[in-house]
Image: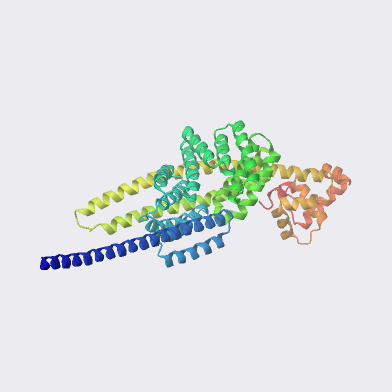
Amino acid sequence: MGKTDLIIFKNIKTHSKGIKKIIAFTICMGLSLVMFSCRRESQNTDQENFDVSLLTESSELQLSGEYEAFVKLNKEYLKKAAKMRYTGGKGLCYLNMAGVNVSAGNYEKARFFFNKAEKDLFNSENAYHKAVFYDNYSLYYSHLKLNDKAIACNNKASYYLKQAKKTKLTQKLLPRLYVNKGIYYAWKGWYGTSLKCFTKANMLENSAYTNCMVAQYYLFTHKPDSAGIYIARADEKMVSQKTTDVESLWVYYTMGYYYNEIDNSEQAEKALKKALEINIKTRRTYSSHIKEVYKALAELYKKKNDGGKAYFYLKKYMEEEGRFDAERFAVMNKATEDFISEMKQESDWHKNDLPLFIALSITLLTVSGVYVRKIINRLQKKKNTLKEQTDTLKNHVRVKQRQEVIELAKKNDSSFLLKFKEYYPEFIRSLLEINVDLENSELAFCAMLKLRFSSKEIADYTFVQHKSVQQKKYRIRKRLNIPGETDIYDFFENLAE
């Protein structure tokens, strides 16, 4: 019994030591898991704070037009992300740079940054990263007027946003996804779906911007009465809420458009001038909007019969539109070249593969050619229409200018010559090239002949005798070496043309 008890005691002792080891191991593992979990949680918190700070500060600078500060901020955060070994953070910095280049109309640069952002964000475990990436990418395609691709990216953004953890960032992004979707569907002509999207966005956010977008929809569909309700709400929200410069620009632009539609030209001019003032301030980060403001101002002044200003702003609009068209074509050409280049790299160039490559290349180039041709034809029609409008406005301006100086001449107004020089600088320059010693009184007399005043009319308007006018004509012939057989009116008519 004694030996048996001793053996049992030893077994219990040995077993007890084993249990202690297991307990110690379990405690160590538990502590390790807790420490790892805490570390992981701390890392997630740091990354979330990084995202919120970066996107909030970047958005404020971009929406205020502070380009240099925007770039500097993203450089700093890029370095910070590298130190944190936070790949997603780097991707967001690249995405911000892509976004600002899209808004500025620099599509090639935007594409470069999108490619870098995609590499860093595609494998991110954070679904919000993918949502915000596809939202920005949809805007890129929208600027290129590729609405189907814009809608596809917007749908992907919505899909990933549903999977994302609810945060302030996700709540802010959701209504903007609806706004953007509403814009894309409006351009496609799906007005019912578009209105649903704008209404949903406004229900979620109810800001000056979202009310403004609903108003724009109603203006786009020619319902100014309904638009007026949301214009008033947008105006009220601008006063009661903090509104960024770019969003204020959209509100003022929409107001101007609305007031022009209801023939309140005074309020329209005031709102559009305010929009233009903001756009000039923010054009380094949001230059893509300025052409719409120019176009609205051209339409306003055309309606007011102010041909000079209408022509000025129409010309500005055409210049901006031309710049953006050039950027769009450059991106399309680059995309086609990249596709062909990639096909070349992937092909082994075996004899069996070569015909397939050639066939695919021909097909690609044909499809691209047809698509580009369609765009060129559409742009050509648009340019022809704009050219007709420009020519009409030019003629209107010339007629108005001519009438203005004629009226000044009839009144014998002292500002006649000054205004004539302003409108016909080449004519005065040509006269002085023939005879640099011509006096102002002689220049004014030549100007009246250019306007085809008869000798009797000149005598009546300048309060001199008819004979004195004839003598002046003779002196001018000598001073300008006009041959006797040349009609003096024809001479001045053809001068400087």
Q: Which of the 4 image quadrants contains residue 226?
A: top right
Q: Nearer the viewer, residue 460 or 164?
A: 164
Q: Which percent across, then down, holds residue 492?
A: 72, 50
Q: Nearer the viewer, residue 424 or 150?
A: 150
Give the image quarter of residue 428: bottom right
Total marks shown come to 0
Which residue is painted at 76% across and 62% down in the image?
A: 436
Q: Position of residue 422 (x, y in %)?
A: 73, 52
In this rendering, is residue 149 above or below 15?
A: above
Q: Is residue 147 above or below residue 341?
A: above
Location of residue 360 in the rendering, given as x and y in whole percent from the top left corner: 28, 49
Position of residue 164 in the picture relative to residue 464 (left or right): left
> What colour scheme does the image use?
rainbow
- The answer to whether 467 appears left or right of 353 in the picture is right
**Quadrant of the image containing the N terminus:** bottom left
Q: Is residue 288 left or right of residue 18?
A: right
> Where is residue 290 drawn, in percent x and y?
58, 49
Q: Between residue 97 and residue 470, name the one nearer to us.
A: 97
**Nearest the eye: 448 or 60:** 60
Residue at image coords 89%, 45%: 463
In-image side of 302 versus 153 (left or right): right
The reply to whether residue 13 is in sight is yes
**Above or below, 128 relative to 264:** below
Q: Is residue 452 visible?
A: no
